[in-house]
Amino acid sequence: MSQLVDSLASGHEGTVKDQFRSYLRRLKGGEMGSVPAIFAILVLTVMFQLASPFFITKLNFANLFVQSAELTMLAAALVFVILLAEIDLAAGVTAGVAMAVYIQLVKVQGWGLIPAMVAAFAVGLVIGFIIGFMVAKIGVPSFVVTLAFFLGFQGMQLVLLGEGGVYRVEDTKVLAIMNQNLPKWGGWAMLAISLAVSYAIALWDRRRRSALDLVNKPISIVYMKLAGLGLIGAISVYFLNQNRSQGSIPILGVPIVVPITIAILFIGTFVLDRTRFGRHLYAVGGNPEAARRAGINVVKIRIAAFVICAFFAVISGVFHASRIGSVDGSAGRTIVLSGVAAAVVGGVSLFGGRGRLAHAAIGAVVISMIDNGLGLLQMASGINYLVQGGVLLLAATIDALARRRGGVITR
Amino acid sequence: MSSVVTASVPVIELTGVRKSFGPVDVLKGIDFSVYAGQVTALVGDNGAGKSTLIKGLSGVQPFDEGYVRFAGSPVEINSPTEAGNLGIEVVYQDLALCENLDIVQNMFLGKEDIKTGTLNEPEMELRATKALQSLSVKTVKSVRQKVSSLSGGQRQTVAIARSVLREAKLVILDEPTAALGVAQTEQVLNLVKRLAEQGVAVIIISHNLGDVFKIAHQISVLYLGKMVANLNAKETNYDEVVAYITGAKTQEGAN
């Protein structure tokens, strides 16, 4: 208001220093994103390392990646509905039912891996559609719909698998996801591809802007981001490539689940940031009435969000089955709450309209670290739940306060 | 006032328009014309039928009877989409912006520019900037600001600029200054003036006659569902308008 500028800025102007300053202003304005969560990761690392000599070990480092992958995928699933200020408490049991269908088809019906998986994902999509339809078209609050499915599907899992039924997963491809590793060069290749793709997209964006004579941010910002990403990636790959076995058979390399997770998050982020659907999803989350007046089919967007949520949840179910090597009737009951916690702790706003898939991943790491670290300290599981609950409450409070403070200065 | 020689054909012309809700006749045969490049103020007391008239024009609640001509040709406006396709944009009192999106994203909401399957952000940013510049907007710092960080006046600015972007031929503003302070009201009124100078026909609903006299070329008064006066703003005065609004005066030949 106070400042009169003749030509409108776009937020891309200024030196690195200016950009850094406007970033700080955004933080102060309440757009903290996952900064508190990253801070929590650092604090937790120091705390647990001081408390337990086992926390920063090669084995536990790899464990953390594997443990958080499952939670990351579920939290990412929930991001799509939380962005609409909705909730899907049934995401975990949806995955459980889909996996029960998969194992039944493989074990009892003798289906192959691919058709059984396709059927499992189809079941997930149908469940997502039904939930979305009930919420968006009929208008039942998502909390109630998904709570009903949460209860009902626990029964469905038992019906499909029989009381106390536990089936071993025997397909090596499924087991490999969580239990096998990339060769050494594979980890480095993964890192190189990630960096190259990020760089290419940044260059492509800059080209498009300069073609229209629009200002670009200093290129050095791109380099700094890549360097940061590269450094964290390189340290991770380096450690994961060390032998972490305590026995005679060496175990080394980046777990296969890591590149799979990165690829899925990349695709999801691309859809959210760069497609019309993604834009409309954020718009409906921010102000459904405005979205409707702008001609957006709000019902369709809502249903789609629940369908995508269910799809991602089934992926998380596959990860879970792969990790524990079996499918049982209780899968997905408790993890869904950790998933919500992960998303919110990572910086996804429960009020809708704000949040990214990366936030889900960062939040999942925080929750997994608490789980893992307290486990190493041999704390009672009661303590674990207390701490997780406290962290979620803290994150939700930060979210509410940030929302009250309002918005941002520049992008 | 740079009296733009208005084209003789009105952008929108209503003849004998009626609308009832059950037994209640809200619009009792309205004749109303709006010209390009002019600001037409629609005034009247609560319940006079202003909102119903606007809802008919924007397709939200189509009229029951009467003729509507758009740029000379007869049309029927049965939905907001049809109104939008004709080039009629309504800037609502409650604005209809998404706070979590930035200015560019809001201006293109529902009409995003797509290139090779993805959002064409640079193009949208450029066009949004041009639309704001064409209205000489100086109060907004960056087109990539989130709407949540904007003041009420700035939000009005964005909403009005959106209609410029969509190349609206008729822009209807519903109480655009109702919630604004003095300085911001001034800015929005200037914006409305410039919108008209671009050749857009503007209808502004306002209870604030001070604002109306500042920007309107024509003042149309509704009284109990009838158009009782179409006054040239330069040839009338505050008291006369109030007299028509309150029913103390009726135009000769209006009844």
Image (cartoon, rainbow, N blue to C red):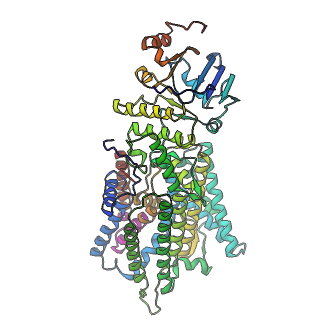
Q: Position of residue A268 (x, y in %)?
A: 54, 63
B131 over B3 or under it: above or below: below
Q: Position of residue A68 (x, y in %)?
A: 45, 70
Nearest the eye: B234 or A120: B234
Residue drawn at (54%, 7%), measured in percent from left and top?
Answer: B250
Q: From the image, which quarter does the N terminus of chain A lie in?
A: top left
Start and end of the magenta stretch?
Answer: A363-384
Nearest the eye: B33 or A231: B33
Residue drawn at (37%, 70%), measured in percent from left and top?
Answer: A224
Q: Quadrant of residue A126?
A: bottom right
Residue drawn at (55%, 26%), measured in percent from left and top?
Answer: B5
Residue drawn at (59%, 50%), measured in percent from left and top?
Answer: A301
Nearest the eye: A393 or A199: A199
Q: Is residue A115 visible?
A: yes
Most common SS among magenta residues: helix
The reply to whether the magenta stretch includes residue A374 is: yes
Q: Is residue A333 visible?
A: no
The residue sitting at the left extreme is A50
- Looking at the rendered structure, the number of numbered marks drawn on it comes to 0
Nearest the eye: A295 or B157: B157
B28 over A253 or under it: above or below: above
The residue sitting at the bottom extreme is A248
Q: Position of residue A228 (x, y in %)?
A: 37, 72
Relative side of A124 to B50, left or right = right
Q: From the image, which quarter does the C terminus of chain A lie in?
A: bottom left
Q: Position of residue B243 (x, y in %)?
A: 47, 10
A51 over B70 or under it: above or below: below
The reply to whether the magenta stretch includes residue A106 is: no
